Image (tube, grey):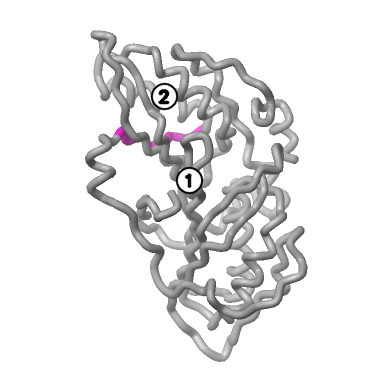
Amino acid sequence: MHPAAEHSPLGKSSEYIATYTPSLLFPIPRTAKWAELGLTAETLPYKGVDFWNCFELSWLLPSGKPVVAIGEFSIPADSPNIIESKSFKLYLNSLNQTPFASTQSLEATLVSDLSAAAGKTVGVRIRSLSEVEAEGVVALPGVCIDDLDISVSNYEHPRPELLRCDDSRTVEESLHSHLLKSNCPVTSQPDWGSVAVEYRGAALDHASLLAYLVSFRQHSDFHEQCVERIFLDLQRLLKPEKLTVYARYVRRGGLDINPYRSTEEVQLPNHRLVRQ
C-alpha cells in the first residue's frame, strides 16, 4: 500500500457531505511510486496527463434549481500529487447542495481547489450532457491483440520478462487490449481497463505484449502507476523513437481515470470507450 493511502478515506465509512467542503480532497504524493520505478520528479521520461471524467456532477443555481453536467479534469502527469479517488468523489458530492452564480464560477472554484491538491494547475471543463452524447463512444486505434492464443499461469505481478521484440526490424504501429485488470492497493477491488500502445521502434511481439498485460491481473497499484510501469517496461525493451501508452479505465463511483504517458508533446484525446 502507498504509505499515504492508509490515511485516506478509501476503504473507510465516510459521511456524505452535500455542501461545499474543499478540505475533503486528499492528495497522495507521487514520489514514493516514482521511486519504486527508479524515477524522480527531475528524471521522468514521459509527458502526459491523467484525465478524470465525472458523470455525477451537480450543483445549484442561485434560484435553487439543480444542474447536472459531466466534468472533465486533466491533471498533469508530473504534478507532485495524485488525488485519492474516493476523496475526489466526496469533494464533488459536496457541490450537490451548493449554489454557484454561474458555470464559470464553478469552474474557477474547481480549478483552484484541484490545483491546490495536485500541486500543479489542473484543467477543468464542464460539459453538457448533449455535448458528450453527440460525441458518442470511440474505438481504440490500431490492432486489437485480445484474440491471440496465449498461455498464462502467473497473475500476481507484472512480468516484463515476458515481453519480446525483433530488434532487426523497426515498425510504427498501434496496438490495444481490453484485458487489462489490476486491483486497488487499498481496498483490493478490481480496476478494469483498456490499454493502447502506439510506438515506433523495434517490432514488438504481439502475443508477448498480451501475456505481459494479463500478468497485471492480480497486481495491486493505482491506475497511474500501472500505466507508468507499462510505459517504462516497453521503453526499456523497444528503445523506441516514440512511444505513447494510455489506459481507459471503467468508472467507479461516477469517476473514471485515464492516464496518458508519452515521449511526445501530443494533443491527447479524451473520448469514451464502450465500457465507459
Taking the spot 57% from the left edge, 56% from the top edge, the residue there is 227
Give the foreground label among 2 and 1.
Answer: 1
- Examine the structure image and report whether residue 122 is included in the region drawn in magenta: yes
Q: Please state the horizontal and vertical placement of residue 197, each as a whole percent of the image.
A: 49, 67
Give the residue pinned by disc 2. 112
In the figure, 45 relative to 109: above or below? Answer: below
List the residue tagged with mark 1. 50
| Residue lying at the far bottom of the rendered structure | 168
Q: Is residue 88 visible?
A: yes
Query: What residue span does the magenta drawing correspond to?
Result: 119-126
Q: Amino acid at mark 2?
A: Ser
On the rendered structure, is 225 left or right of 101?
right
Q: Could you say where residue 128 lies in the image, as x and y percent from the top left? A: 26, 35
Residue at the image position 57 percent from the left and 27 percent from the top? 87
Give the numbered dot on residue 133.
none
Name the spot of residue 120 as percent of width and height, x first. Answer: 48, 35
Position of the N terminus by quadrant? top right
Label 1, residues with CA under 10 Å away: few <14, some 14-19, many ≥20: many
Residue 63 vs residue 87, the one in the foreground: 63
SS class, disc 1? strand
- Look at the image and tell me whether residue 242 can be seen: no
At a point 76% along the width and 66% down the height, the residue shown is 154
**What is the crowding at mark 2: few (fewer than 14 residues within 10 Å), some, or many (at least 20)?**
some
Question: Height in image: 125 above or below 153?
Answer: above
* Of pointers 2 and 1, the one earlier in the residue sequence: 1
Left or right of 158: which side holds 201? left
SS at circle 2: helix
**Frontmost residue, 124 versus 217:** 217
Q: Are marks 2 and 1 in contact (CB under 8 Å)?
A: no
Quadrant in which residue 266 is drawn = bottom left
Depth order, front residue of 46/207: 207
